[in-house]
Amino acid sequence: MKAKPVNPRLPPPFGRMTAKELDAVSAEFDQEFVPTAPLTPGMRARLRRAKRKRGRPPIGKGCKDVLISVESDLLKHADAFAKKHEMSRSELFTRGIRTFLKAG
C-alpha cells in the first residue's frame, strides 16, 4: 500500500511527500541554535546607523506640530516670500515668532 501524502494542497514537491519524507527534508531547519560570530566594528557601526530614527534632526528641544489658521492671501504671500528666500514655511513662521518675541 502506497503512503498517503501529508497535505496535497501544499506547493510541489511538498504536496506529494509522506510524513517521513517531509521530516527528512525539513530536518535542517529543526536546529535551535545557529552559531554566529561577534560583530566586527564595521558591522556594529552599520547596525547602529540602521537603528537610528529617521526624520528631521531635533532643533533645540524638539518640535511640536501646531494647527493654526492663517488668511488665504497672507499664506500665499508667506509661501512666496519663503520660496524666494529659500526657506520652508515652518522656518519663516519660526523666524517671525522669534522676531516678534524679541521685540516685545
Image (spheres, rainbow, N blue to C red):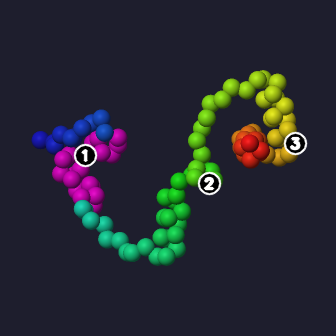
- From the viewer's perspective, is 38 left or right of 58? left
Q: Quadrant of the C terminus?
A: top right
**Which amino acid, mark 3?**
Lys
Q: In the image, 54: left or right of 31?
A: right
Instruction: Specify few, some or many for label 1: CA neighbours under 10 Å numbering under 14, 14-19, or 20 or more.
Output: some
Disc 3 versus disc 2: distance between alpha carbons? 26 Å
Does residue 91 appear in this view?
no
Is 94 or 84 nearer to us in this picture?
94
Question: Is 29 colored magenta in this rendering?
Answer: yes
**Would you say the residues marked 3 and 2 are in contact, meaning their CB atoms lie under 8 Å apart?**
no
Of all residues shown, which one is farthest toward the front?
104
On the image, which quarter does residue 95 sit in? Answer: top right
Q: What element does badge 3 sit on?
A: helix
What secondary structure is the magenta-colored segment mainly?
A: helix
What is the CA distance from the residue labelled 1 to the residue labelled 2? 63 Å
Residue 81: name its quadrant: top right
Name the residue at 60% across, 46% down: 63
Counting other residues with Cα less than 10 Å from the Cα at mark 3, is it few (<14), some (14-19), or many (20 or more)? few
User: In this orientation, which residue lies closer to the viewer: 89 or 94?
Assistant: 94
Numbered mark located on residue 60 in the image:
2
Dot placed on the residue nearer the N-terminal end, 3 or 2: 2
Kind of residue at disc 2: Gly
Q: Which residue is mark 3?
A: 84
Q: Which residue is mark 1?
A: 17
Answer yes or no: do the residues labelled 3 and 1 have beta carbons within 8 Å?
Answer: no
- Type of the residue with mark 1: Met
User: Is residue 103 at least partly visible in the picture?
Assistant: yes
Q: Is residue 60 left or right of residue 74?
A: left
Please tell me which residue is depicted at 62% across the width and 30% down the height of the picture: 67
Query: In percent of the image, x 21 and y 41: which residue is there?
Result: 6
Instruction: Give the image location of residue 37, x and y in percent.
Output: 37, 75
In the depicted structure, whether residue 3 falls above or below residue 79: below
